[in-house]
């Protein structure tokens, strides 16, 4: 579950478009298709860095989460 105010982008492969796409959490497509995952990651980073808080969730071709990258203030390290 995303924290309030945190932009979350998913990098996924979609067979129907034949490439990698970037989708904002909630379903709105942000970009793509891209021929490589690296291109999609670069687009996701541009989008997430425009917010104070952000996260990129990277999926493999099988749809399973491979890794996550968090940007901005880490709430576990800052109190109040």
Image (spheres, rainbow, N blue to C red):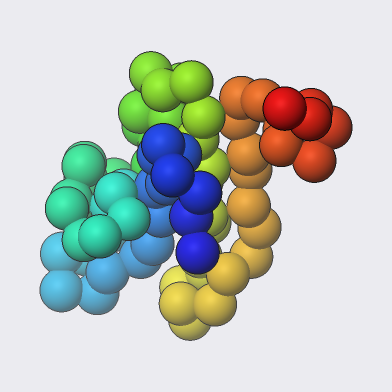
Going 48% across and 81% down the picture, which residue do you hit?
A: 62
**In this image, 34 relative to 9: left or right?**
left
x%, y% of residue 72?
61, 24
**Which of the 4 quarters of the picture holds residue 70?**
top right
Q: Quadrant of the C terminus?
A: top right
Q: Nearer the viewer, residue 43 or 15?
A: 43
Residue occupying the point 21% across, 41% down: 31
Does residue 7 sit above or below 22 in this rendering?
above
Q: Residue at x 54, y 77 (%)?
A: 64
Residue closer to the observer: 37 or 28:
28
Residue drawn 15% across and 74% down? 16
As drawn, 24 above or below 5: below
Residue 69 position, x and y percent, is: 63, 43
Q: Is residue 20 above or below residue 50?
A: below
Q: Is residue 38 visible in this depiction of the protein?
A: no
Q: Nearer the viewer, residue 11 or 8?
A: 8
Residue 51 or 79: which is nearer the viewer? 79
Left or right of 66: which side holds 63?
left
Residue 75 in sight from this viewpoint: yes
Query: Residue 71 appears at what percent x and percent y?
Result: 60, 30
């Amino acid at each position: 579950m995303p924290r309030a105010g945190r932009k979350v982008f998913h990098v996924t492969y979609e067979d129907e478009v034949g490439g990698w796409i970037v989708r904002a959490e909630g379903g709105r497509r942000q970009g793509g298709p891209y021929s490589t995952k690296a291109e999609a990651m670069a687009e996701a980073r541009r989008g997430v860095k425009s917010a104070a808080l952000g996260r990129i969730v990277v999926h493999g071709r099988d749809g399973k989460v491979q890794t996550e990258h968090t940007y901005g203030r880490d709430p576990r390290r800052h109190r109040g």
